[in-house]
Amino acid sequence: MSRERLVVIGGDAAGLSAAAQARRLRPPDDLAIVVLEQGPEISYSACGIPYWIGDLVADRDMLLARTPADFAATEVDVRIGTRAEGIDLTAGEVVAAGGERIGYDSLVVATGGKPMRPPVPGLDADGVHGVHRLADGADIRAAIAAGAKRAVVLGGGYIGLEMAEVLQTRGLSVTVVLADPLPMAQLDDDMGERVCKAMCDMGIDVQTDQPVHEIEVDADGAVRAVRTDAGSYECDLVVLGLGMGPEVSLARDAGLELGVTGAIDVAHNQRSRSHPEVFAGGDCSQTFHRITGEAIHVALGTHANKQGRVAGSVIGGQPARFAGVLGTAMTKVGDLEVARTGLCTTQAEDGGFDYRTEVIESSTRAGYYPGAAPIAVKLITERGSGLLIGAQVVGGPGSGKRIDVLATAIWAGMTAEALAGSDLSYAPPFSPTYDPVVVAARVASRIEQG
Amino acid sequence: MSRERLVVIGGDAAGLSAAAQARRLRPPDDLAIVVLEQGPEISYSACGIPYWIGDLVADRDMLLARTPADFAATEVDVRIGTRAEGIDLTAGEVVAAGGERIGYDSLVVATGGKPMRPPVPGLDADGVHGVHRLADGADIRAAIAAGAKRAVVLGGGYIGLEMAEVLQTRGLSVTVVLADPLPMAQLDDDMGERVCKAMCDMGIDVQTDQPVHEIEVDADGAVRAVRTDAGSYECDLVVLGLGMGPEVSLARDAGLELGVTGAIDVAHNQRSRSHPEVFAGGDCSQTFHRITGEAIHVALGTHANKQGRVAGSVIGGQPARFAGVLGTAMTKVGDLEVARTGLCTTQAEDGGFDYRTEVIESSTRAGYYPGAAPIAVKLITERGSGLLIGAQVVGGPGSGKRIDVLATAIWAGMTAEALAGSDLSYAPPFSPTYDPVVVAARVASRIEQG
């Protein structure tokens, strides 16, 4: 047989997008596709795990989008429970568990991410969990069912916030322990303070500026408390919400070049810089920031899907490239929606930007319409050019998705003045006459004009 | 006294924005400002009237944003109950009711709009109401309080939809009578059908393709039925939801030039084309479409506010221009959100555009997240360039405001491909991994690429 073979390591967002896109472009008699997934299932939504834990999602299977059988129907051979033990870049082979060597013409490395772990004693105790795989969700659910009463969430990023919320919903008392002075370190302090206040108002105990020293463990090897400089927080459940790092042990051992972020270094077409026949995408790969051009690691399903798709297109013979990220992200804690895009002031500072900031407060709906809630919009604009380079939104229901307007404006290279003049929708149930985004843009452009 | 005087005719969005902005830029000893408002109040939200009728807004005064006293504090002389009877363009004077002549150096005509009225008998009967001034809202509320049971809404645009919903909420049986084949004529038929179905599912009786022939009146002069070719619809309340035309009688009588739309013809700085010392803005003035460049009349508070602000800036000595409209608009009927921007296919056809359309169906949230609802996104792109030129969104809660992303992308001159690559937010409570907007953009760009 002269047909080529694509091997994909990892059966979630990036890997499966690559496989599906390659298949769309090349039929089975031209390209064989094998996907190796070490876990028991593919195509699961890691982002949905907190909501499953919170009983908002009734059944774990709802988090599964596609099955191996779906892929078999297009002659993509998905092998679950099949761990890739090594990559032989010279021979062009993947070594699967058990020793099978699978030759490839193209390889996609989509090994995903891994929860960041603080280097402290006790982290392997019973009762300490990441929120990464469905098994983590099952473990945390089991801990709650077994009577867990007090949880400590380490970290106040997206996963930390979501886990704090759902654990509280499930009746646990929740302490969030942060090394940073505020939750949501991707926000500026003034916006992070709004998030912190909302968490405290919900009854979540937020302990800031406290790097963890130890997970205290009882005689049975179960977690008993989280200890910091300032105190010891008793708990029977610890959740790691410190973010995700790239899972690159396989790539590193094989000799694939890693980038400055520690993730696999790839070109815009997702090809490995050191081995162009190898592609990488998703949480294990490095990407670049749309504004600064600098290397960045962002673990997010949207990027993983797109990057996998780019790899699949290129393998399929259709030129494609990933266009970079703005770091757009969104979450909620209780009724408070939190979103950001582009550069925060720290990033702008680090990047050598001369910038201005402006924060406005407005209302999610016409003030007189039921359910109108406060919303704060912060814009970061480049001094002189007036270009939008960053935005943050914190507010009540309906606030968060407004970040997409700002992400689009930044993506398109709009100035605050141009955005202020744009024609956004208005209806009393959905916005004041001037949408808060427009109010912010107008104030920012007025300041630019002096 | 050598100070100049600005006279503003009309005390709502455009007129007051002009007055406020002029005052910001020029102090009272430099510029006297007089605002004449024929009605009993200023600064009221016409868009909020349906929701007041629907008891969602408890108190009419909640619809009033600012009072004459607020303006008096900045030495803007707002005179309510003061009708402008004429404009003497030669003398530079406004003739107020009672004969007072008020000289001006600059004049802002902001006489607003008036409900469109079909040319049929019976339109002046008791029980026939526009939804334009607060008094209309009070009249309709009084009719409901007096026992009105059956309403006919003429027209299926924004006001028609909103009135149908709130009247039903108040317990009336509602028939919507349309001359068009579908409600929401600003949408393409395939999207309008979704709206029509939702209205029918709510129990609203929608009668299409039926121009009104007569409002039938009983012996007491009260409305009894609405008659069309196809039938006679008994009712005790008729609401005009046929849209707003420009109120230009004063301007026309004075000799100000009107444009092809019948509204006052103004340059981009809101100056009258025939009399540059006169400005016009808001529902009485003509504007231009951002994509086609053609003259258009759009009655909407957002534009009125901006246009008034432009006039006030220019009068204040600061150059400004209105940047045009995309015809972005949004409303809801029940839980269905409806929004559009840019060109619909009819407009694209009329404008000589070579275009493609694409409709996708997706979900407002991650499919597994509670409250996920269907959303349809239609994109209209220019063939060849791939530029986005129009978009329509119809779907469940959270759908409508997504039009702002598309309006921003169109405003910025983005292609579908660029939008497909952009970095929009993702979190399960707020969108699927690929936001529906991105899904639509990707499909549209794939089709463009062939």
Image (cartoon, coloured by chain):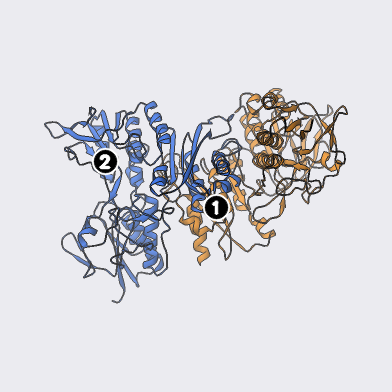
Chain colours: A orange, B blue
The residue indicated by pointer 2 is B138
- The furthest residue to the front: A2
Residue A331 at what x, y percent from top left?
Answer: 60, 41
Is residue B157 visible in the rendered image? The answer is yes
In front of the other: A47 or A287: A287
Q: In which quarter of the image is residue B109?
A: bottom left
Q: Are the residues at dot 2 and dot 1 in contact (C-beta closer than 8 Å)?
A: no
Chain ID, mark 1: A
Left or right, B7 with reference to A216: left
Q: Distance between the residues labelled 2 and 1?
A: 42 Å
Residue A409: image tag: 1
Q: What residue type is labelled 2?
A: Ala
Q: Is mark 1 on a helix, strand or loop?
A: helix
Left or right, A96 with reference to B26: right
Residue name at image x 44 percent, y 53 percent? B291
Residue B131 at what x, y percent from top left?
Answer: 29, 42
Residue name at image x 50 percent, y 58 percent? A418
Residue name at image x 44 percent, y 41 percent? B339
Residue A356 at what x, y percent from top left?
Answer: 58, 61
Q: What residue type is labelled 1?
A: Ala
Residue A62, above or below B118: above
- Mark 2 closeness class: few <14, some 14–19, many ≥20 residues within 10 Å: some
Residue A306 at what x, y percent from top left?
Answer: 65, 41
